[in-house]
Structures are given as C-alpha cells and as structure tokens.
Amino acid sequence: MLRRDPFHRKPSMTVAKKRAPARPASRKTSKTSTGKKTSLGKLPEWDLSALYPAIDSPQVKQDLERIDAECAAFEEAYKGNLAEMVSRPAAGAALAEAVKRYEAIGDLIGRLGSYAGLLYAGQQTDPIRAKFYGDVDERITAASSHLLFFGLELNRIDDAVLDAAMEDPILGHYRPWIDDVRKEKPYQLEDRVELLFHEKSMTGHGAWNRLFDETLAALRFKVSGKALSLEPTLNLLQDSLPAKRKAAADALAVTFKENLRTFTLVTNTLAKDKEISDRWRGFADIADARHLSNRVEREVVEALVSSVQANYPRLSHRYYALKAKWFGKKTLPHWDRNAPLPKVETRIFPWTEARDTVLGAYGEFSPRMASVAERFFKENWIDAPVRLGKASGAFAHPTVPSAHPYVLLNYQGRPRDVMTLAHELGHGVHQVLAAPNGALMAPTPLTLAETASVFGEMLTFRALLRQSGPDQRRTMLASKVEDMLNTVVRQIAFYSFERKLHTERRNGELTADKISEIWMSVQADSLGPAIRLGPGYETYWSYIPHFIHSPFYVYAYAFGDCLVNSLYGVYEKAADGFADKYFALLSAGGTKHHSELLAPFGLDARDPAFWQIGLNMIAGMIDELEKMESI
C-alpha cells in the first residue's frame, strides 16, 4: 500500500530489560572565524538499547522469528475473510480486533527496522552494519508481504458497510487510518501485482537508495591536502576565509564530477521506477502520490509554489543583492552564498550552551515542551558527533510508539548547528506527543511534520534575538533570513527541479549534462542575478538525499516554514491559550487533516493569501536589514 505505514521504519526505523551503558561521549573542537580552536565539550552518542541491546542480541533473532510467525498467522486468520466478517453481528468489534493485531505486528516490525536503520546511519561504511541492515530489511519485506492483503481487502468492502461497522467506537477509533486507506482505493492494483511491487522494492528502489547512501558516505573531498567527508566539507562553505570557502566548493565539484556517472544512473533509475509505479497506479501528475501520502490537495501545493516563485525578486534576489553589497561586490560566487558576514566573528556554541539555549527557548514558550525535549539529552536519545562514515545531515526518527524517537546530528558548533538542534528536537517533541495514537496513526503527513521543527527553530531564534545588541541583531537577522530562504525559496526550487527532471525522464534517459542543465536553470531563477553560479556548481544536485529517498518531499519544508510563520504571528497577537491549541495540533499525529488542525488558529492553507503571510515575515526581516547601517 502507498500510505505511510509502520512496517518499514528506516531513517533517511521486547524493550531491553537492562539498558546497555551509553558509549563514551566524544570531545570535539571547532574554530571561530579568527581561527581560534574552541572546545565543543562532550558530544553525546545515542543509546539504542531501548530498541535492542546489541546487533547480536538473542532478542533480535527471536523477534525476527516472531514476525515471520505472526505475519503468516495473521494472513491465515484473516485473508479472504474480511467481507464476511463485517456482515456478521458485532462486526465493528471483530474488525477492530484484527486492526489491533495488525498494528501490534507493525510496532514490532518497526522496532526491528528502526534499530537496523539507526545502527546503519551511525556508520554506513561498516560492512557488518550494512549487512545487518540489508538482512533485516529482507526479512521485514518477506514477512510483511503476508500483511499486504489487509488494506486491499478493506478497500473492497462497501463504504456504507464499513461506515456502519465504524459506528462501534472500538473500530471508530481507527477511522482516521481506515479513511486514509480508502483514499488509496482508486490507485490500488490487483493483489498479485501489489505483492510483486512490495517484494521487488528491496531489490528495486530500496537497493538504489542504499547504493546512493553508501556512495555518499564513502566520498572524500580533498581540501588543502586533507581528505574530508561530506559534512565538514559543506561546513567550510560557512568559513570566514574566502579561500577556504572556494577550496571547499572546488573540492565538492571535483569529487561530485568523479562520481557523476553513478549519481546519474541512480537518479535515472529511480525516476523511471517512479514513473512505472505512477503509470500502473493511474496517478495523473508526477507528484500526486506524494500529495496523497501528505494528505494535501494538489491545488494547495500549487498555490504555495506559485506564491513563492512570484516572491523570488522580493525575497532571495533582493537579499543576495544586499549581501553582495555588504561584501563590496555586485555579485557573489556560489560558495559565498552562505558565507558569514564580513567583519563579524562567527560564534561557536559549545554543546552545553547549545542545549541550554534551545531548552531555555522551549521553556519560555511552555515548560511542558522543554520537559519533553530535555529527555533527549538526559536519556541519550541524541547522536551528535561528526564521524567518518556517519550519515550526513540531521534527522529525528520516531521509531515506534512502544519506544521513543532518536535524533542524529553532525554538530560543529556553528549558529546554524544550534538551529538544527532546535529543529530536530521540535520533530522529536512532536513524535513523543503523537506516539499515544499508536503505530498506525502516530505518523504525521510530511507537510505537518515540519510544523513543530520550524516552530522550535523560531522560538530559539527569537530568544537569541531578544538577548542581542545592535551588531549581533544584524548578524542574527541575516542568518535567519538565509535559513528561511534555504527552507522556502531553495526547497521550492528543488521541487521545480524534480518536476522538470521527472517530466524530462519520461521522454528517455537523461545525461548528466542534461540533469545539470535543469539544475542550473532553476537555481539561477531562484537565487537571482546577484549569485554567480560558477563552474562546478552544476554537479551539486547529485548529493541531495531527498531527491533519492523521498521524491517531491521538499515542498514540505516550505509548507512548514510558511505555516509556522503564520502560526507564530497568531501566537504573538494572542499568546494566552495558544500553547494548549498547539499541543493539541502536535498530539493529533496523523488523525486529522491540515484544515482541521489549523482551524482553531483561524488559518486556512487553501487560501492563497495564507502563504503570503509567511512570505511577508521574511520580506519584513529583509526590510529591517536594508534600513540598518552598512556593514
């Protein structure tokens, strides 16, 4: 089935009786813009024993055998029987029992998948972890094939009959999940075809995803004689020294170009794989499958995209022209787009200060929010250090309701790293609050999944801004504008890139040059004339994981940012009672449509004016920067 399900909880998813001790925290250093080394302090590494004690734990073997048995038994008990079951008295209670059993199996499968996925994310170049990850994925795929019939048979039951059964509150509890399953009815295929799609996923798109991850993790970028992994190389693009930024950009271009054949093959294969799936299922538009899983209407996304694109000149074009002026230039090379402002020392945040900053900002909004977030620090739910072979970027992974979320970072002490911590903890708080909905209804659509993360960033930013003097205020505003442009403008440009790429792919395989041409065109449109896209930048599409793992995901960032800007405006005007409504939104998980969740705040994402509210907040910050004295 298409819907977000609990059966493949991989990042990018019997509690242990005794927790294994956490690994010793890593002590790292970073550099200020003056080159002075600053200790980040002890960086935490996560303790995965809430899932399983170890890779060779007997519990892992027992649970793998258990899912084999339980999935087969579930199929034996219910396959071919659902239609007759709902025709009998007490149909609601009988079907509810089946759904509960299905959900419990999903939680167990999700626990195994989460453990394997998180272990692998921590060190993707380790062959032992890679094999374990692959083996678990294979077992999960095989076992869950016995469950595939359930959603298909539910959708063959007449809607009126199913609605009557859901009048029993025991089954009615699962109405949001059942309604989501029913939305997929027009796109579901004959049972054996669905089974083939399911079983081939491991050797199809799943295998190409893994190839991409392992290739990216193994890449090394030669900067000033040192071989660096991706994260520290990208971090140098924010170094205060222009020569280091250029060296990092050149190193990225060289290595990406050397591996472009692989990235081009992966991209072409996955785009074709998606086209085949969409064609068989009957989706009219290349992004409709994503919209369906996000529970968002195509016209809502189109309104968002057109609003952002119309604001390119007012936002990104204007800001980057202003930034070039601060640097005493008419244009900036692409490696200076996120450069720190001139004559301003980049501040480094030791880990404890970053923790206290974020928890303090959360606590000002709500002690409850800070209390939930604090558990991530106290109970070793965070993996922060940069390590060779570790997954790049950052994520918060919900695992399963019977356990708890985990956060992965690549923390290097920059202000943006503090914002990333705030962002991922926002996800984590959301996941903790939604977990009581259970494995089927805790997962949140991607559009609303970014709400808590972006709101957490905004709370942290506003708290730091209130503590800042004039010079610091200017620096922080500029940094926040850049983050928001990266979240809104850049992600919509990414979405435009994907639309063009997938459309072109339907006419045949794309060369690396053609993909690069599409990339450069959308980047030039979104960034504007003040950013000079020099040689080498045409390869930068190759490392974006969202294009590989979750096509068309990226608009969710812009959706979340604009939504949060509007939410924050409501909060500033009427703070009393806002926190209760906000926690109700987060606690709903996947049980309500975005229109229901936003209604208590007087907001409607279907109104094109809604998006302009969020975009106006970014424009207002640029207005303030323009009024400030030249740097």
Image (cartoon, helix red, strand yellow):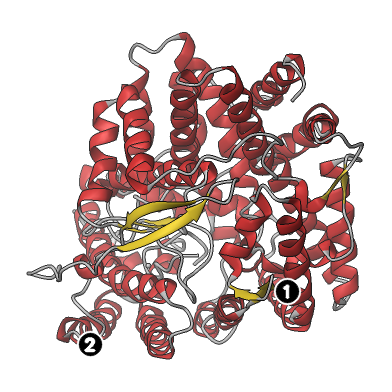
If the image is split into quadrants, where does the C terminus sit?
Answer: top right
Q: Secondary structure at mark 2?
A: loop
Dot 1: what SS? helix
Answer with left or right where residue 408 lies relative to residue 336.
left
295 to 139, vertically: above or below: above
Q: Can you tell which mark lies on residue 301? A: none
The residue carrying pointer 2 sits among few (fewer than 14), some (14 to 19) or many (20 or more) residues within 10 Å by Cα, namely few
From where the camera sits, is residue 588 visible? Answer: no
Image side of residue 120 versus residue 309, left or right: left
Nearer mark to the viewer, of 2 and 1: 2
Position of 306 with respect to 132 (left or right) is right
Identify whether 566 is placed above or below 353.
Answer: above
Location of residue 364 in the rendering, given as x and y in whole percent from the top left corner: 32, 23
Residue hosting label 1 = 267
Residue 598 visible at all: yes
**Residue type at mark 1?**
Thr
Checking the image for residue 56, the label placed there is 2
* Percent position of residue 598, x then y: 48, 27
Disc 1 residue crowd, few under 14, some 14–19, many 20+, Cα 10 Å: many
Task: Name which residue lies at 21% across and 74% down.
Answer: 52
Q: How many marks?
A: 2
Relative depth, front residue between 224 and 505? 224
Say which amino acid is labelled 2. Answer: Asp
In front here: 190 or 32? 32
Identified at 39% across, 58% down, the residue is: 384
Q: Position of residue 602 (x, y in %)?
A: 51, 17
* Sequence-first disc among 2 and 1: 2
Which of the two residues, 445 or 522, is positioned nearer the viewer here? 522
